[in-house]
Image: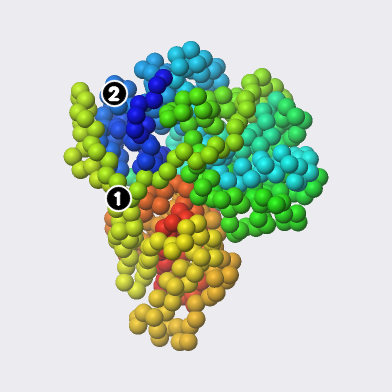
């Protein structure tokens, strides 16, 4: 396929929750242009298109007929729908990027890849962040140079309350061939495979903590559904080079937080970043390699973060059709093969062998992608058949829009907010902590609170860092909405209408983008709060390395 001149034409099929992350990311790059959003629910496709300045929306058929599209981003749900949509896109001559997983069955995925190979288009598969982040590439270099000695084994785990806590329609996560294993498993398996090679055999056990799940957000709050899969899976994998890995995926009422990837080695144990977060830390508590900073819970990324985060080709497509992409279909097929083998092992109690291989995973090439300037306006797409056009195409307003969205979340004397741009790019957490300290000083200067804070001095930046915990990006918007809308001390009292808070919070998180890091002093698992002032407070802070957003709710306890 010969690339067209100009930006790569991209479409989105599937305008659900995850599409927000894709759209907010793609709109930042100058050589990728989303031309149309498709979904079976046309109103949902229209909403996503209008919110992100995309020129057209319609059905999946409209999308594939659009002559300005070269790469299809397949976000359909459930995963059982992925092969049909991807096969139709390949038949239409489009490259395909598929959300996890490529298919439900490995044979379906293999058939898709064979058809694409015969026809010419490329196929790529999520999750890309686990193989493209600077932490992983620092680790790959350290392993190749034997900076940490010979790697003997690895360990990765995730522990969360479950998607029913944040997703408005979580039922598919607990259906057959789903659950934590197939939802988050791709993220946590792709990382060790990218570092150590293909898996050859697995043994696994599983159990189910709760038989019924209750939706806790959105219009369906209170709706119950049965759990049809294990929500706790623990697996032992062997790689083709003889190394071993232990992986666990847990979804329970009591645990919260995602764990890192650890590697006991002859030189020293190493810790790698959370797989679902693109930036991350990488290093050893006792033996710091020359290419990585000292490991620590709150240390900064180990490689040149922004250069690496933005200097890669995530999936298939122009401008260099002979250049291999990284998160390939073969890698996605192998991960699916491993996941289904783990699932079979849970059911049978037997060791399962795996014949597929991931192939060679290249390192990040020199930067070919650049961020779209905030002032760029994307022109509307040309009319095409029955596709409806967006009459309100507009570019991101950058800092101004971020500040306005945060301001919409503030409430006098209760919810204090701030948004801005760092003077220097790529700030470390202490620099974000300095902004938090400034917000606390503003609270102390408020006449309404001065009588409660005689002689108050905000805590130091290190003290603030010690009070913060990382928060997953997908939890940031609902957490921010609750912080702005619901009173901490009297939950029956609302500062803002829920719909108003949710809309503004969604926009803030979208503007900062999926690569943003989020921090809070609030333990979402047990409800505990580490106070940063003498008052009862809850904080959320986020940054994408250039911009930041802070929200602090305080109340006289």
Mark 1, residue position? 375
Seen from the viewer's position, the closer of residues 503 and 129 is: 129
- How packed mark 2 is, by other alpha carbons closer than 10 Å (few <14, some 14-19, many 20 or more), is few
- How packed mark 1 is, by other alpha carbons closer than 10 Å (few <14, some 14-19, many 20 or more), is few
The answer to whether residue 125 is left or right of residue 73 is: right
Secondary structure of the residue carrying numbered label 2: loop
The answer to whether residue 225 is left or right of residue 353 is: left
The colour scheme is: rainbow
Which quarter of the figure is the N terminus placed in? top left
Percent from the top left, x then y, of residue 7? 35, 34
User: How far separated are the C-alphas under marks 2 and 1?
Assistant: 27 Å
Secondary structure of the residue carrying numbered label 1: loop
Mark 2, residue position? 67
Instruction: Indicate whether 31 appears above or below 287.
Output: above
Instruction: Indicate whether 540 appears above or below 217.
Output: below
Instruction: Indicate whether 399 appears above or below 265.
Output: below
Which quarter of the figure is the C terminus placed in? bottom left
Seen from the viewer's position, the closer of residues 455 and 543 is: 543
The total of numbered circles placed on residues is 2
Q: Residue at x 56, y 51 (%)?
A: 304
Could you tell which of marks 2 and 1 lies nearer the N-terminus? 2
Tell me which corner region of the image, top left, top right, bottom left or bottom right, holds residue 336.
top right
Instruction: Indicate whether 32 appears above or below 331.
Output: below
State whether residue 81 appears in this view: no
Q: Residue at x 24, y 33 (%)?
A: 381
Residue 40 is labelled as none
Percent from the top left, x then y, of residue 195? 66, 37
């Amino acid at each position: 396929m010969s690339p067209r001149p100009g930006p790569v034409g991209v479409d989105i099929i599937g305008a659900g929750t995850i599409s927000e992350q894709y759209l907010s990311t793609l709109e930042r790059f100058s050589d990728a242009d989303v031309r149309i959003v498709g979904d079976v629910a046309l109103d949902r496709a229209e909403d996503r298109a209008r919110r992100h300045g995309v020129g057209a929306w319609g059905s999946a058929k409209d999308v594939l007929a659009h002559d300005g599209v070269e790469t299809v981003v397949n976000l359909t749900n459930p995963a059982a729908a992925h092969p049909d949509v991807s096969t139709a896109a390949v038949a239409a001559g489009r490259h395909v990027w598929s959300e996890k997983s490529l298919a439900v069955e490995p044979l379906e995925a293999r058939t898709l890849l064979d058809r694409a190979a015969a026809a010419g288009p490329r196929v790529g598969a999520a999750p890309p962040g686990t193989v493209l982040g600077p932490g992983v590439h620092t680790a790959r270099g350290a392993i190749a140079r034997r900076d940490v000695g010979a790697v003997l084994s690895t360990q990765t785990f995730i522990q969360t309350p479950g998607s029913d806590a944040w997703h408005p329609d979580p039922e598919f996560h607990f259906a057959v061939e789903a659950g934590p294993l197939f939802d988050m498993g791709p993220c946590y398996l792709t990382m060790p495979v990218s570092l150590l090679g293909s898996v050859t055999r697995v043994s696994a056990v599983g159990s189910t903590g709760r038989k019924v799940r209750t939706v806790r957000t959105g219009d369906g709050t209170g709706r119950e559904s049965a759990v049809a899969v294990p929500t706790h899976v623990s697996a032992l994998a062997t790689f083709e080079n003889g190394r071993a890995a232990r992986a666990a995926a847990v979804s329970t009422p009591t645990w919260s937080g995602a764990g890192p990837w650890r590697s006991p080695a002859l030189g020293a144990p190493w810790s790698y970043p959370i797989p679902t977060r693109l930036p991350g830390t990488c290093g050893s508590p006792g033996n710091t390699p020359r290419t990585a900073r000292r490991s620590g819970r709150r240390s900064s990324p180990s490689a040149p973060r922004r250069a690496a985060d933005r200097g890669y080709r995530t999936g298939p497509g122009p401008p260099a059709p002979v250049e291999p992409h990284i998160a390939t279909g073969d890698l996605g097929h192998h991960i699916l093969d491993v996941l289904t083998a783990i699932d079979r092992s849970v059911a049978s109690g037997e060791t399962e062998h795996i014949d597929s291989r991931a192939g060679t995973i290249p390192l990040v090439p020199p930067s070919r992608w650049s961020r779209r300037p905030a002032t760029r306006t994307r022109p509307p797409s040309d009319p095409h058949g029955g596709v409806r056009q967006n009459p309100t195409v507009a570019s991101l307003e950058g800092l101004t829009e971020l500040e306005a969205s945060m301001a919409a979340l503030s409430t006098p004397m209760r919810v204090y907010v701030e948004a801005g741009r760092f003077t220097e790019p790529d700030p470390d957490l202490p620099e974000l902590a300095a902004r938090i300290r400034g917000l606390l000083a503003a609270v102390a200067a408020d006449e309404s609170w001065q009588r409660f804070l005689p002689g108050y001095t905000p805590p130091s930046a290190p003290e603030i860092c010690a009070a913060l915990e990382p928060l997953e990006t997908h939890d940031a918007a609902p957490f921010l909405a609750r912080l702005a809308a619901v009173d901490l001390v009297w939950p029956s009292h609302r500062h803002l209408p829920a719909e108003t808070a949710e809309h503004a919070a969604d926009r803030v998180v979208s503007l900062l983008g999926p690569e943003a890091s989020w921090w809070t002093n609030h333990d979402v698992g047990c409800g505990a709060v580490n106070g940063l002032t003498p008052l009862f407070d809850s904080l959320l802070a986020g940054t994408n390395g250039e911009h930041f957003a802070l929200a602090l709710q305080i109340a006289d306890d």
